[in-house]
Image (cartoon, rainbow, N blue to C red):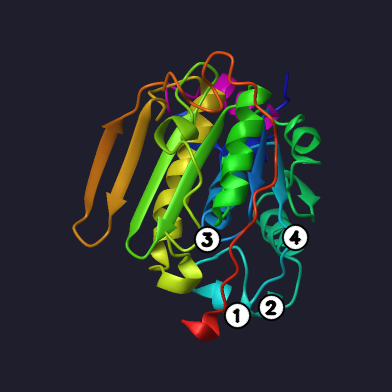
Amino acid sequence: MIDFSDEMLERYSRHILLKEVGVSGQEKILSARVLIIGAGGLGAPAAMYLAAAGVGTIGIADADVVDLSNLQRQIIHSTADVGKAKVLSAQETVNAMNPDVKVVAHRLFVDSSNIAEIISGYDFIVDGTDNFPVKYLINDACVLHKKPFSHAGIIQFKGQTLTYVPGAPCFRCVFPNMPPEGAVPTCRQAGVLGVMGGIIGTIQAAEALKYILGVGELLAGKLLVFDALTMNFRKINVNKAKTCPTCSEGAGIKLIDYAAPVCDLKKH
């Protein structure tokens, strides 16, 4: 049981006032462990709101360094962080925001050889990546190891998110196979409105907190699609696919690394 200091009671007072949270719920949040894979457009706002909420341990996995082009949307980093490892920049921002939070920096590329070990110590996984190969790997690993996670993707003015919990439809129930190279442009190729990461990444943080608290309805079995140009949110019902290559009966999941398409901003 956590011994709340006066400072902690004040910091989390707006949570504690909520009947769905209270002191016991805030204790759950402070005891929770959430892993964010990707400290970019989605992972940045998710990490900041989870840190502000008081999630006790936040793991951040990313091998990249901060680039000037990141700052249009990756709000956990600042101009002074350009050239710095994203996990270290994110760690410094979180530490400055909330000293109650422990940040575990995983400075590495997540792949089939390390993902099982990385996710094993966490209660909930946030997929903040921007490429299909790792998204499929995260889905497969989380299904295999029965880890709840939030999938999300953004491009241009559109975003989508779905939450997986054991027994629910997974990402591959909706998108069974990775699209062929060149079929879907990346954010680097097509662009993305900066605030899209904030809108969708914050929804991912909300899903993580609801899971930790055991309240409300998660986006399990639902794909939430958002269009910023029309300000339209749509929820699409998702069913478990009998032939899903990951979560169907007898699927026999094997974790593999898919080849990622290479793109150069100067060519687009």
Query: Residue flagged by tag 2: what amino acid is it?
Result: Val
Q: Residue at x 28, y 34 (%)?
A: 236
Rendered image quadrant of residue 263: bottom right
Q: How many marks?
A: 4
Dot 1 or dot 2: first in sequence order is 1
Dot 3 or dot 2: first in sequence order is 3
Quadrant assignment for the N terminus: top right
Mark carried by residue 41: 3
Q: Is residue 21 magenta?
A: yes
Q: Are marks 1 and 2 in contact (CB under 8 Å)?
A: yes
Give the foreground label among 2 and 4: 4
Q: Residues within 10 Å of mark 2 (few under 14, many from 20)?
A: some
Residue 230 in the image: state x and y as whole percent. Answer: 18, 58
Which residue is identified by label 1?
68
Task: Let me know if residue 11 appears in the view.
Answer: no
Give the foreground label among 4 and 1: 4
Mark carried by residue 98: none
The answer to which of 42 and 45 lies nearer the viewer is 42
The answer to which of 193 and 215 lies nearer the viewer is 193
Residue range of the region highlighted in magenta in the rendering:
18-31
Task: Let me know if residue 145 appears in the view.
Answer: yes
Which residue is identified by label 2?
82
Query: Residue flagged by tag 1: what amino acid is it?
Result: Leu
Rendered image quadrant of residue 118: top right
Secondary structure of the residue carrying numbered label 4 = loop
